[in-house]
Amino acid sequence: MQSTEERLSQCLTAVAERTTADQDWRRVVRAAHDRPQESAAPRILAYAAAIVFVLAAGALIVSRRSAPTRIDAVDSNQYVLPGETLVSVEPLTVTPAPAPLAQIDPNELGDEIVVEPLTQTDDKVQSLIASHVGTSPDRTITKVTLLGTIDGHAFVEVITDGPGTLAGRTDNLRDRWFIGPGGGSASGDFVDPDTTDFMGSAIDPSSSGPSYSTPVGDVVWNVRDETAIVTFESDDTRAWIRPVGGYAIFPTEFDTGERFTLRALDINGEVIDQTSVTTEDSTDSSIGPQIGDRFDRIEVTELDGNQFQIEPDGNPTVLLYGADWCAPCQAIQDQTLPLIETIDPNVSVLLVPTYTSPGETWNLGPEWDQPQIQIPTDLSGIQQVPTIIILDGNNTIVSVSIGVDGVIEALASLENLPTN
Amino acid sequence: MTSKKLVSLGGSDHAEVIGELYEREHLAMVRLAHLIIGARAVAEEIVHDSFVSLLERPNGIDNPGAYLRRTVVNGCASLGRRTAVGTAKLQVIADRDRHGSVALPPEIDETWAVLGSLKQRQRTALVLRYYEDLTVAEVAHSMDIRPGTAKSLIHRGLKALKKELETHAIN
């Protein structure tokens, strides 16, 4: 039976092979050169002034912090649409509420930075526009408005006019973008000002309804004040604040069982509402290797291509699934090595890099010299890492355990299994 | 992908390099964009705009092929970030594309339809990983995201795809 990956790959190839396109290089050249040729100097100054104003306003606003606000209780259930990954929804009582990272001075909101029409007639302007707004050469920027700031990022609304495209769309005359400190935020994404790591994207609830597409599913949340600030934070992630109009910024990675909190703040930075969601353990225990499954032999391929078989030779086999990208898997390094080192030498311990690129190893450190293998076909379907599978000497699965604690318990139980 | 250095905006060398790139990569990029957004006509426009942007770019580019792919992916992402109305329109175009194209074998047609129901970022990551055959690091670079995010998108995309395909099979 085909795996999902094989089926996907086959589908993509088949559709691609049926996709045709007419080349028209002249049209590209025409579009690139059919642009107004006019003096750029005033526009450079105007645009530079706009950027300087935006960044200065950002620095000023970030420096203003107001006192945390007290809220008593909220009924949050009405705000959440339980999806497949949402299980617990609980009201929070926070007294006092944590101070938001940045405050927005209402006097700054809506300030307009009116500039002369800008066109990409100059390298500097073109570069700025290309990196911030993504207009095509024949699109004119008519107005830039400061909507708010966040951690030194300016959030601006850009209004354009004329033919061509804004952010790749011909019908897109208005768009909202982040401009990072120093002017370096691409594609409207929000990046950490210190590390430049990607943090999240802005979405527009005014057109997609009062819902936020989050990493834990769609959260429907009717913020009472349309000018509310929405924050979205997890237990172990810093809060990111998005001012104005219910735009939300959210982290793009999360772990099972991680709790996310959404807060709405008014433009004075006071918490007016909040709710939380927790990602569920989505493991379906009926999928993947099961305790009691027995195999006459298991075909195994090491990452270097070497192949061998796990035979029912009377000695147990341990398969440890994990990956570098999985933080808990790295925790195994210190916590389980002492257990691994005391395992009977007749027991085979195999490391199985999971959800990694082909051939990519799981780097646990020099003390770990166990063979690293591709996921065996017979033992595929692992849904979470770290996972440990233990086969007894008859090649029967006697343990399938998930998580660091599960791995440690399973390794500790090994001493009860007979060896030759 | 070429790694030839581009030297100047609008210069003849620059235009020549981009022209060669166009001849070599245009169809591949249209296919890539089509797989990501599901609508061939829109894909062609995104690729067109990407080449215009490349031709207009003022500074040298070390790897125009990779830059082009990133621009195309960004173009698709910008489209995907648009409003629900925009998404709905895109779906109409995609459906029209689908019904107007050569018939696909049932299993592939079903996979293609399910793929279209995934979130755009998941679909993009899956296409880059399983069609373009990029490494996770390359997927991350193409999408301007962190490798961990790319892995997460691929993993969750595959999981969602598998689940939907199983649901279809049951029905």
Image: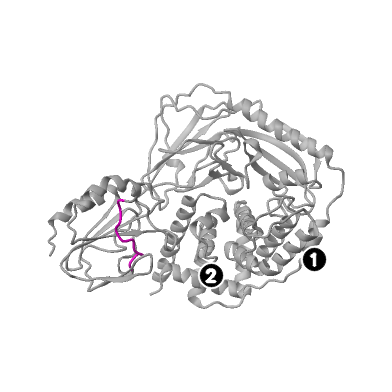
Q: Counting residues from the N terminus, which is met first, the one under dot 2 or under dot 1?
A: 2
> Dot 1: what SS?
helix
Q: What label sits on residue A12 in the rendered view?
A: 2
Query: Taking the image as drawn, is residue B164 in sight?
Result: yes
Q: Position of residue A117 (x, y in %)?
A: 81, 42
Q: Position of residue B145 (x, y in %)?
A: 54, 50
**Chain that bears disc 1:** A
Of the residues shown, which amino acid type is indicated by label 1?
Arg
Q: What label sits on residue A388 in the rendered view?
A: none
Q: Nearer the viewer, residue A257 or A44?
A: A44
Residue at (33% x, 71% y) in the render: A307
Q: Are marks 2 and 1 on the same chain?
A: yes
Vertical arrangement, residue A202 with respect to residue B25, above or below: above
> Is residue A370 a member of the stretch shown in magenta?
yes
Q: Which residues are magenta?
A: A367-376
Q: Farthest residue in the front direction?
A: A366
Residue at (60% x, 73% y) in the render: B99
Q: Main secondary structure of the magenta part?
A: loop
